Image (cartoon, helix red, strand yellow):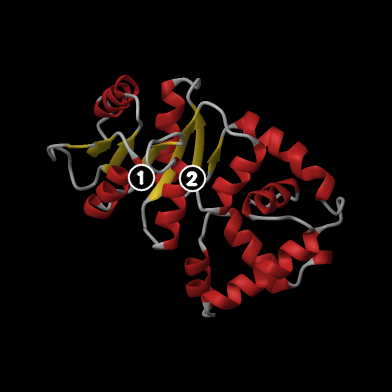
C-alpha cells in the first residue's frame, strides 16, 4: 500500500519515499522527517510492489527502505532499481543483516545502511550525507564486514604497486560514491570498459564486490 503525501515543501528540499511494512514504524519515520525543514515526504509504502511504483512515479532523491518487506524484500527492490539505472539513492533500514547480506546490499548499489536500534538523529544525518554524495555504513556492520573480508585480502601492499593508474583512479571514484555510468562519463570510456577494469581490480585485490573494495580502499586512505 502507498500513502501519497501532499507537496508542501520547497523544490530545494530533499524528496523522500519511506517504506516499512510496520505502520507504527512508518508513522514514526514520517514524523521524524516531517519535523525537519529540509525534507519533503512524497509517499509512504508498506510493501515491495507499492514501493517500486512510488519510486517510479515520484522519482525521489532518497528511498528509506526496510530490508524486510512483504512481496519483494529490500534487497530485491534495490536490485530492481539498480538494474533500471534509477537516480534515487537507497538507504536501507535493518534490524539484522549478516555479512553476506551487507556485501550484497553494497554490491547492488545501496548508499547507506542504518540499524533500526540506532538513534533517530543518526538516520537523519545519514540521509543528508547520502543526498550530498557520501556513503554511510553502520560502524558495527563495517567492523563485521572487515573481519569477514580480511582473510581474502592481499596484505598491506600499497594499491599503487598492485593496480594500474587507471584502475587506481576508478577505485578512488568508487570510494567517492560514483556509479559505473558516472565513472564512464568522467573518464570518457564505455560503461563496459569500467566493468572490465573493475573485474581486474577485484581479481588483483582478491575482493568479491564493491563493499570489500570500499573497505580495502579505506584501509589505504582512499575515500
The residue closer to the viewer here, 76 or 24, is 76
Q: Residue at x 60, y 54 (%)?
A: 175
How crowded pointer 1 is (Cα within 10 Å; few <14, some 14-19, many 20+) is rated as: many
Single out the residue that lies furthest toward the bottom. 189
User: Residues under labels 2 and 1: Cα distance?
Assistant: 15 Å
Could you say which disc has been placed on residue 62 in the image? Answer: 1
Q: Residue at x 50, y 41 (%)?
A: 112
Q: Are marks 2 and 1 in contact (CB under 8 Å)?
A: no
Q: Position of residue 213 (x, y in %)?
A: 68, 54
Q: Quadrant of the N terminus?
A: top left
56 displayed left or right of 128 = left
* Quadrant housing residue 125: top left
Q: Is residue 180 above or below residue 58?
A: below
* Quadrant housing residue 42: top left
Q: Position of residue 115 (x, y in %)?
A: 51, 27
Element under label 1?
strand
Q: Residue at x 53, y 45 (%)?
A: 135
* Residue picked out by circle 2: 75
The residue closer to the viewer here, 158 or 96, is 96
78 displayed left or right of 4 = right
Q: Earlier in the sequence, mark 2 or mark 1?
A: 1
The residue closer to the viewer here, 98 or 163, is 98
Q: Position of residue 50 (x, y in %)?
A: 27, 43
Q: Is residue 172 above or below residue 145?
A: below
78 displayed left or right of 146 = left
* Quadrant housing residue 65: top left
Q: Residue at x 78, y 59 (%)?
A: 205
How crowded pointer 2 is (Cα within 10 Å; few <14, some 14-19, many 20+) is rated as: many
Element under label 2?
helix
Q: Position of residue 47 (x, y in %)?
A: 32, 37
Asked whether residue 147 is in view, the answer is yes
154 displayed left or right of 189 = right
Amino acid at each position: 500500500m502507498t500513502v501519497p503525501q501532499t507537496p508542501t515543501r520547497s523544490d530545494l528540499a530533499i524528496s523522500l519515499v519511506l517504506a516499512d511494512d510496520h505502520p507504527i514504524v512508518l508513522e514514526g519515520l514520517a514524523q521524524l522527517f516531517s519535523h525537519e525543514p529540509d525534507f519533503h515526504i512524497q509517499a509512504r509504502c508498506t510493501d515491495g510492489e507499492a514501493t517500486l511504483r512510488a519510486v517510479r512515479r515520484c522519482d525521489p532523491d532518497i528511498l528509506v527502505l526496510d530490508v524486510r518487506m512483504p512481496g519483494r524484500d529490500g534487497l530485491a527492490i534495490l536490485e530492481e532499481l539498480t538494474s533500471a539505472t534509477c537516480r534515487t539513492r537507497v538507504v536501507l533500514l535493518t534490524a539484522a543483516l549478516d555479512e553476506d547480506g551487507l556485501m550484497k546490499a553494497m554490491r547492488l548499489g545501496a548508499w547507506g545502511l542504518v540499524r533500526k536500534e540506532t538513534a533517530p538523529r543518526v538516520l537523519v544525518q545519514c540521509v543528508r550525507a547520502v543526498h550530498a554524495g557520501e556513503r554511510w555504513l553502520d560502524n558495527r556492520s563495517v567492523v563485521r564486514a572487515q573481519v569477514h573480508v580480511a582473510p581474502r585480502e592481499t596484505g598491506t601492499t600499497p594499491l599503487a604497486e598492485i593496480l594500474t593508474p587507471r584502475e587506481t583512479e576508478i577505485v578512488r571514484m568508487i570510494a567517492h560514491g560514483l556509479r559505473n555510468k558516472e565513472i564512464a562519463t568522467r573518464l570518457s570510456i564505455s560503461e563496459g570498459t569500467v566493468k572490465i577494469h573493475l573485474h581486474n581490480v577485484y581479481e588483483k585485490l582478491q575482493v568479491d564486490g564493491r563493499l570489500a573494495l570500499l573497505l580495502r580502499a579505506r584501509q589505504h586512505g582512499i575515500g
